[in-house]
Amino acid sequence: MVAKTRGRRRERGYVRRRGNSFQVLVYSGVDPLTGKDSYLTESTKDERQVEKIRTRLLAQVDQQRQATTKASLAYVLDSWLDVHEAEPTTLAGYRRAAETRIKPALGRVPIAKLTPRVLEQFYAELRRCRNRCDGRPYVEHRTSEPHDCDENDLSTRRRCQPHQCRPYAAATIRETHVIISGALSTAVRWGWLQSNPAEVTKKPKQPKPAPKPPTPKQAAQLVEAAMAQDESWGALVWLYMVTGARRGEILALRWHDVHLDTGMLEIRRNIVDGIEKDTKTHQIRRIALDNGTCELLRVHRKRYEEQIRAMDEAPREDAFVFSYQADHSRPCDPDGVSHRYKAMCTGLGIDSHLHALRHYSATELITAGVDVRTVAGRLGHGGGGTTTLRVYTAWVAESDKRAAELLAGSLRTVPDA
C-alpha cells in the first residue's frame, strides 16, 4: 500500500501517485549549488516494485553519507596541487583558478556529494555568468565601504554600474573541468572516493581554434614599421615571422644557439613569466634559416659586438640575442615585447598581436604547399602534425584548393561532359 505523503517531505523515503505511476522519492540532502532539498527519484507502474526501489535508493544515499572521508573539494584541491607534477606557471594558473572559480562555488561541498549533475550545472552557470548571479538585476558596487552610488558624473570609471553577465570562455571552463577531474582522480587513488564523478560528466566543449594571422601585405607593413623604429626591434619581429617560434623561445635565444655558418637556429629554452626553462615539448628543435635572415642576424650580431666592446668587454657566446641591456646579460621582458608589438599594430591600424605571427608563419607555409609534418617541426608541435592540422585546418583546405586549380590549369583542354 502506498503511504500518504502529506506532512512527510522530510522522511527518508516516500511515494506519491502520479497518474498511473508511482514515484519513489528519497531525501538525499541539500543541493550544493541551489541550496534546495535534493531527492533521488525513480518511477514505476508496478506497485509491487515500490518497496524494492525505495530500499535501493536509501542504500545509495547511505553509501554517499558513509564515504571514507568527509573532505571538502577545497581540501582535496589543495592536497592535489601540493603533489601534482607540472610546470610552476601551470600550477600557479591552477591555483588561481581554484581560488577564483572553483572554491567560491563548490569549495565547501564534500567530495562524496559531488555528482555529474552538480558539475554540469556548475559549468552551465559559468557559461552564463562568471559571477554566477541569479539572473536578477543588481548594482555592482565599486567598494564594500559606505559610499554614494548616485554620482552625477556618469563618465567616471569608478561609478557603480548595473551588473552585466559576462560568461567565461570555453577554454576557461574546460580548464576548470580538468582541474576538478584531476583532483578527484587523486582522491580516488588515495581511497577518499570510490569513483570520480567528473569522468562521466559531460565535458565542456573544446573551443574551436580561430587563428587570425596578418595578411602578407600587413606583415610587410609591420616589418617596415619595426625596422623604422629600431633595427634590433625589426630583427626580432622578422625572426618571429620566419621561424614561427613561440615568444619565450625567441627571447631565450643565446648566441651559441645561432649557427649562421650553417644557417641553423637551435630552440633549446623558453622564457615564461620571467623564468627560463625547457621548451614546451621539452625537446630541442632546429630550424633552418634562409640567407636573408642569416645576413640580418649577422648585422644584429655586429651591433652587439660594437656595444660590448665600447664597454671594454669581450663578446660572449652565452649572451642573449635580444636584450635591452648593452651587454645582453638579460633577455627582453616577454610582456614588454608583446605590448610594444601591440602598440605598433594599433598605430598602423592593424588588429593583431604577437602570437599571430606564429599563425602567419604556419599558414604561409601550408598554403605554399609545405607538408604538415615539416610545418609542425618548425612550430614545435607534438603528435606528428596532429595539433597543426587541428589548428590550421582552414588553411590546409585553402592549400588543397590551390592544388586543384593548379592541376586543372595544367590541362590544355577539359573534355565535354
Image: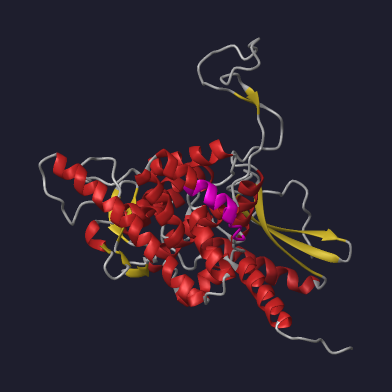
Q: Confirm whether residue 353 shows in the render.
A: no
| Residue at the front extreme, as displayed | 412
Residue at 64% across, 66% down: 394
The C terminus sits in image quarter? bottom right
Q: Residue at x 37, y 66 (%)?
A: 289
Question: Is 3 placed left or right of 235 in the picture?
Answer: right
Where residue 400 sits, quadrant-wise, is bottom right
Magenta segment: 208-223
Look at the picture and state if 342 lies above or below 15: above
Location of residue 5 in the rendering, given as x and y in whole percent from the top left corner? 77, 52
Q: Which picture quadrant has residue 415?
A: bottom right
Measuring 54% from the left and 63% from the top, which residue is drawn there?
198
Left or right: 6 as drawn, with respect to 84: right
- Is 2 magenta? The answer is no
The number of callouts visible is: 0
Position in image of residue 158 (x %, y %): 56, 19
Residue 220 in picture, x, y percent from top left: 53, 51
Considering only vertical position in the picture, is 178 above or below 376? above
Q: Quadrant of the N terminus?
A: bottom right
Q: Nearer the viewer, residue 162 or 246?
A: 246
Residue at 34% x, 43% y is: 333
Residue 406 screen position, x and y as percent:
68, 78
Q: Is residue 257 left or right of residue 364?
A: left
On the picture, is 174 further left or further right than 38? left
The answer to whether 116 is drawn above or below residue 323 in the figure is: below
Closer to the camera in the image, 188 or 328: 328
Asked if residue 342 can be seen in this view, the reply is: yes
